[in-house]
Amino acid sequence: MSAAANSALPEAVRALAEADFGAVAQRFAQAGFTVSLPATGILTVKHAAPDAARPAVLVSVGVHGDETGPIEMVAWLIEALARTPRELAVDLMLCVGNIDAIAQGKRFIDADLNRMFRTERGALASAFEAARADALIAATCAFFEGAGPQRWHLDLHTAIRPSHYPMFAIVPEIIPDAPRKALIDWLGEAAIGAVIMNPKSVGTYSYYSSEHHGAAGSTVELGRVGTLGQNDLSQFADASKALDRLLRGQPAAGAKAAPHVFATARQVVKLSDAFSMSVGRETWNFTPMKRGEVIATDGDTVYKVEHDEELVVFPNPDVRVGLRAGLMVTRIG
């Protein structure tokens, strides 16, 4: 995004999009919090006195540079909270993921940052985003070190394509029952209509936080990709209220409706350049497919629907070889 375009944005939105935490950091510091900027685009705000009962909450936005709605939502929320800083009831880490991609209005520069949070990166190891993932991992380790048992990571995204559930979330199965229930309850409060239980990491930031730091982590899809400064913030109203309530330590408002819960039937992995999907790029998330239908072919490998009904999520044949090209789910709740 050009400097001229950024200058037309409201100051709070411009600052977060450019990872400029100056004013916000100063307000929290003046209120007596321990404030640090461990890397560009990362802010941590901690209470001076350690308290194991206090939640540690990591909020990330812009891991994909074209997913701008959560940047706007969080910008206004943090701006308001910083004006009454003593109402912050958690230790907070706020990070802006792919700063360079946000500046260019692109999803990523070289490769998907949200596939980099793993030990073995293979062909992604030399990608531009690898160094950014390393910085986020280091800051995340430092933030959660010594934190109490209540650990959250809400990685806020928007989806590329339309969805039969406009708001949905991916939740790692490895989260223990009690924090998982608290997370799903919060997602319901945020008007998230569907939750997909994920049994295996594909290198996402939220799964990394859950696996390595015991966080109740979730990739939260809040509607559709939009242009920075032009998002319809009304679609984020419930999520914004739920996040604001969490950060201020206020009682939960309760879910308007419990999310529908889905199990992962299989990951559709692109094994070679011969990969081809039977569903088009215009296919909506959560589009149903019937038993026996071909999902994709990849040389001798044929992915077929094995249950009476499975729903396809994130179909994308254009990913790199070795990465997930789609997710098949079945409803369980």
Image (cartoon, rainbow, N blue to C red):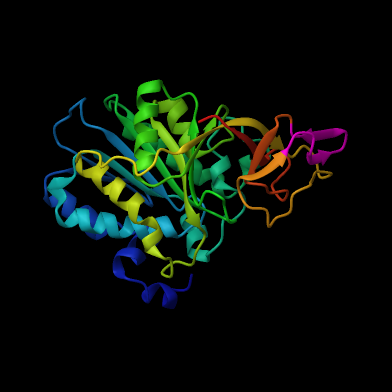
Left of 63 or right of it: where is 284? right
Disc tally is 0
- Give yes or no for residue 110 being in the magenta stretch: no
Magenta segment's dominant SS is strand
Looking at the image, which is closer to me, 293 or 70? Answer: 293
> In the picture shown, does residue 144 fall above or below 77?
above
Q: Which residues are drawn in magenta?
A: 290-305
Q: Give the residue drawn at x 21%, y 31%.
A: 54
* Image quadrant in which you'd find residue 228: bottom left
Whether residue 170 can be seen here: yes
Residue 70 x, y percent position in the rendering:
41, 55
In reply to whether residue 293 is colored magenta, the answer given is yes
On screen, residue 77 above or below 198: below
- The residue at the point 64 percent across, 40 percent down is 311
Q: Is residue 35 visible?
A: no
Residue at the spot 73% in from the left edge and 54% down from the top edge? 280
- Left or right: residue 284 versus residue 151 is right
Indicate the position of residue 74 as horizontal and vertical percent values.
33, 55
The spot of residue 31 in percent (x, y) is 11, 49
Q: Is residue 173 left or right of residue 271?
A: left
Residue 299, given in percent of the width and then of the height, sits at 87, 37
